[in-house]
Every structure is written in structure tokens, then in C-alpha cells.
Image (cartoon, coloured by chain):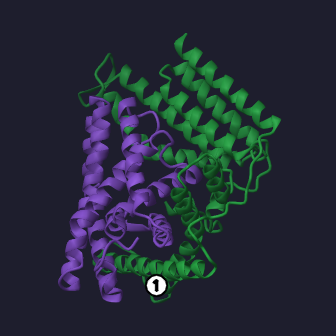
Amino acid sequence: MHIVDGALSNPVVIGGAVAAAGGVAMGLRSLDLDRIPTAGVLAASFFVASLIHVPIGPSSVHLILNGLAGLLLGWAAFPALFVGLLLQAVFFGFGGLTVLGINALNIAFPAVLAGLLFRPLIGRGSPIHGAIWGGIGGAFAIAATTVMVGISLALSGDEFLPAAKLVFFAHMPVMVIEAVLTGFAVLLARKVKPELFQTRPAT
Amino acid sequence: MAHVLGPQERTLAEAGTVGQRGMITSLDPRVRIVMSVLFAVVVVSLSTLPALAAALMIALALLMLSRLPWRKTLKRMAMMDSFIIFMLVLLPFTMPGDPIFTIWGFPASWQGLWKAVEIALTANAVILTLMVLVGTMEPVTLGHALHRLRCPETLVHLLMFTIRYIDVLHEEYQRLRAAMKVRGFRPGTNWHTYRSFGYLVGMMLVRAIERSERILGAMKCRGFSGKMLLLQDFTLTRRDIVFAAGLGALCLALILVDFA
């Protein structure tokens, strides 16, 4: 899902960077003194979660869980996921430097959207009800991310269109897995710590 | 991505290549960050093959100067390439132009091939330079340097917290996995595996939030007022200026080669 340096056209890269800066600023505004530790520890958990490989057939996929990040953090998911991408690029060599903005936008904006749309639905009703909406939110975030990656590629040139379609279809199984895992994670959280989804985002 | 962290490497610092003594590590971290951003912007703007090849050469030369274990670093770079290889292989077939050859009725074009080579050169030159110049820092130093470069304070705090707790939570993850393993859990493609991983993630998040509440309590009881004192100070030396000027001149030369 990472786009690398040099693949995208300049307007897309610059537009992505500007939009990401706006998103990060929005997220930072929602972080006051009491919420910074929570956001930091959750950002670290999502970084660690992205190290988990889940088997699927003969292969395996690593988790992204941006939907779950959005459900828990709201707007603060934006800077949290941005920090994760920055650390991945610097210390692991994944992604790129000039594309940091557009990559953050593609992963974090769907997360925030999932949080805004589905968070109110998760706190209500039985834990199972919440888990189903959590799963839908998880699938939604991945689908939106692949669509946004596709759009970034397609805007950069028509020759990327087949690659963009391939990205979308290749991520179908990832969507299903993320949905199931997000659903069960929400189910557990609703049972163990019911207050988590009841109030405003736990940032 | 788990394969990135080897079995002995538990931390970001170990995954990066901190502790190596080379030309690069003694330079001012701020200079290293600024120069790698400048280099990235210049390289992305290049569009001719000779200039891009020269850029990759500069990146490789920096790798040599840094005395990093080059085999390991290049292997990591190749790992990134394996992610983008599909897109690069597709490009010659999807970009219209003069045909080179045809596979199953799909013509491959020179233009597409060159475009793919350009992207590969750009991506590798930028990421290698970033890993050599910035990836060799202590993660905490990265936070301090970004703070001195006037990054928003809240973002730096968030970065510092994330860096601090990645190790802690990775250890916790490994403890949970070990606990699952001794109970006979073996991951496979089945519902049980997905449910177990879902609960694992949920458990990690619930524990993380409870941990963060304890952290906040501990910080408040020590009088935390939202201001973090970052003690590390940096001073520019002549070597930093020479390095910055040298790399800057190389960037300028790249632009000139590109125009020629």
C-alpha cells in the first residue's frame, strides 16, 4: 500500500502533502495534555500491530488496522498514523520521503472517516452489534485506502490505471481479514472495557 | 513486516543501525535531516536517466561513507523493491509507445520501460539516502532534532511517546504470542486463527490504553505541565557545513546534468 518516491506526479505529491499537513494539524488540535500519552501509546500499538502477519492460504498479509485506529482515536488517528509511517520510512526503508504526505493521507483519512461514521454505532446495543459495525468500519477503511491509492496513481498518469485496479482487487482478501479482526477486537474491547466506545474518542 | 525485525532485534534502534561509528554519525542530526529532504526533493524532480543513475551513485557513496553493514542495508532496500516490482513490471505494457516485444498479444513499450527504470532509480536513491542519513540516528535524537527544526511541539511529543512505547508493546505482543503458543495455537487460514488474532489485537489495545492512563498519572504526579524538556542541544561545526555544502553542490550538479 506504500507508494514510493518518483511514481507520482508533482501536483499529486504536493496536494497530498498539503492535505496531510491539514489533517495532522486537525489531529494535533484535538490532543491536549491528557490525551497525548494515550495517543502515543496507541500509535505505538498500531505500529506493532502492523508487524503481525496473518496467514491467508499459502501467503500472509500484514495488518494495517487503520479503521480500528480511527475508531479509537478519531482525528488524532491522523498524526498517530503519520508518525508510524515516518518511523517506517526512516528506520525500515518502507515507502518514501516526498510521498510521506500522500501516503499519510491515503491511510489516515479513511481512518478518520471510519471513526466519524461508525464510532457512534459501535458504542450502542449489544457487544455483538458493536463488533459487526466495527468490522464494517474496518473493511470500509481498507477499501477507502485502496481506492485513494488508486486515485493517486490514476491522477499521475493513465498508464498506472491497470496497476491501480490490481491494487484494489489484490486487497479484497485484506479487506475481509481486517473486517474480521477489527470486529473481534471491538467485541473484546466492548466486553472487557465497555466505557471505551461510550464517550468521545479516547485520545 | 515482521521479517524486518530479526529475532535478536527488539527495538527500532537495533532495526536501524545505531551505534555504527562512521563519517555520517558524527554529523549534526539537523543537517542530516535537512539534507536528506533536500536530496529527496531534487532527485524526485530529475527526469533523465544519467542524472538519476548519478543520484543512486551518490546514495551508494553515502552508504560507503557511513560504514553501515552494506549487505544488510541493501537487502532492506531490495525488500522495498519487491513491493513495487508488480507496478514496475506492468508499466511497459500499460504505457503506449514504441513496441520492444510482445507477450500474449500485449506489446511492451520503450517509454514504459524507461518510466519503470526511472521510478526504481528514484525510489531507491531517496530511501537509501534517508536510511543512511536519518535512519542511523537514535530514534530519540530524531525527535529532538525535529523539535529544534521547529516541528509542532505536540507532534514531537507524540513521536517521542510512540518511539518509547514501540519496544514495550512489541515485548508485550511477543509475551502474548508466547502464551498463545504454549496453549497450542498455530496460525492457519481458518476462523479460529482470525478470531484469536482479533482478540490479541483487542487485548493489546485495551492494555495499551490502561497503560497510558498509568503513564499520565505518573507524569502528573511528577508535575508534568505539557512541556517536555528536551535536553539534547546541537551545535553546527565546520564539518557539518562542509558536508552540507558538498551534498548541496552534488544536488546542483544533478540538476545541471538533468538539464544538459
- Where is residue B215? Give x, y as percent: 55, 79
For residue A188, say whether it is visible: no
- On the picture, is B5 further left or further right than B196? right
Residue A62 lies left or right of residue A125; in this view the side is right
Query: B93 or A19, which is in the foreground?
Result: A19
User: Is disc 1 surrounded by few (<14), some (14 to 19) or many (20+) residues within 10 Å?
Assistant: some
User: Could you tell me which quadrant the C terminus of chain B lies in?
Assistant: top right
Tell me the amino acid under the disc marked 1. Met
Q: Residue furthest top?
A: B260
- Which chain gets the green colouring? B
Q: Which residue is at the front of the view, B128 or A68?
A: A68
- Residue at left offset 59%, top offset 32%: B39
Q: Secondary structure at mark 1?
A: helix
Identify residue for label 1. B180
Q: Quarter of the image holding residue B105? A: top left
Which residue is pictured at 62% across the width and 66% down the height? B11
Q: Position of residue B53 (x, y in %)?
A: 57, 25
Residue B86 in percent (x, y) is at: 38, 41
- Left/right placement of residue A135 relative to residue B101 reads left
Tell me the subunit letter for badge 1: B
**Residue A36 versus residue A90 in the image, above or below:** below
- Looking at this view, is B240 or B22 the one in front? B240
Where is B221 relative to A201, above or below?
below
How many dots with numbers?
Answer: 1
Relative to the observer, which residue lies in front, A142 or B95?
A142
Residue at 47% of width from left, 53% of height from top?
Answer: A85
Name the tint of chain A in the rendering. purple
Residue B158 sits above or below residue A149 on the image: below
Q: Is residue B21 visible?
A: yes
Question: Where's residue B30, x and y in %?
Answer: 67, 44
